[in-house]
Amino acid sequence: MSQDLKQRLKQGGRDTMERGKRAAAEQISEIADAIDRAGAQLDETQPMLASYAAKIADGVGDLAMHLREESFEDLYRRTRVLAMRHPGMFLLGSAALGVAVARFMKSTDIEGRRL
């Protein structure tokens, strides 16, 4: 394989990953908005739950922002540190991210077919 072809394939992979990262950030942002709306509805009847929902929505919104703004290398380093310091939180966050990715994959057209 020529060096030029390798470079184009590598760049194509990066572009695909970047598009996926942006799409995941959008999905995660929508989840944060939904949690925030649910918390707003709870505000009058369950203020304690509304407070927790607001905190969760803020954290999920921050995740979406980091996905949009940070490089893959930065995200990888941040993820490793989080996993080592807070394994429980890391597992919970991984599950939430898995849900967002699954939603994205269901809504994405793959090979001309809708899943």
Image (cartoon, rainbow, N blue to C red):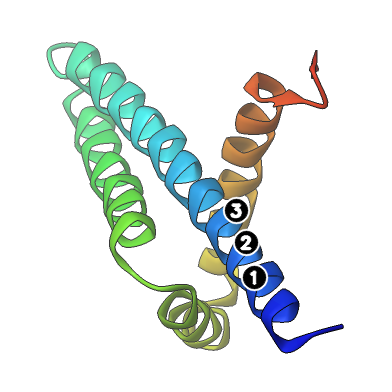
Q: Residue at label 1?
A: 8
Q: Residue at label 3?
A: 16
The image shows residue 78 at horizontal and vertical percentages of 43, 81
Q: Nearer the viewer, residue 41 or 110?
A: 110
Quarter holding the C terminus? top right
Q: Residue furthest right?
A: 1
The image shows residue 23 at horizontal and vertical percentages of 48, 39
Residue 60: give its label.
none
Earlier-in-chain disc, 3 versus 1: 1
At label 1, the amino acid type is Arg
Q: Nearer the viewer, residue 8 or 92?
A: 8
Locate residue 45 relative to residue 31 in the image: left or right. left
Q: Nearer the viewer, mark 3 or mark 1?
A: 1
Quarter holding the N terminus? bottom right
Locate residue 81 relative to residue 95 in the image: left or right. left
Locate residue 104 relative to residue 51 in the image: left or right. right
Asked whether disc 1 touches disc 2, contact meaning CB atoms under 8 Å apart, the reply is yes
The image shows residue 34 at horizontal and vertical percentages of 34, 22
| Residue drawn at (37%, 28%) of the image | 30
Asked whether disc 3 touches disc 2, contact meaning CB atoms under 8 Å apart, the reply is yes
Secondary element type, mark 3: helix
Q: Mark 2, residues whose alpha carbon is within 10 Å: few (<14), some, or many (≥20)?
A: few
| Residue drawn at (64%, 20%) of the image | 107
Q: Mark 1, residues whose alpha carbon is within 10 Å: few (<14), some, or many (≥20)?
A: few
Secondary element type, mark 1: helix
Secondary element type, mark 2: helix
Residue 12: give its label.
2
At label 3, the amino acid type is Thr
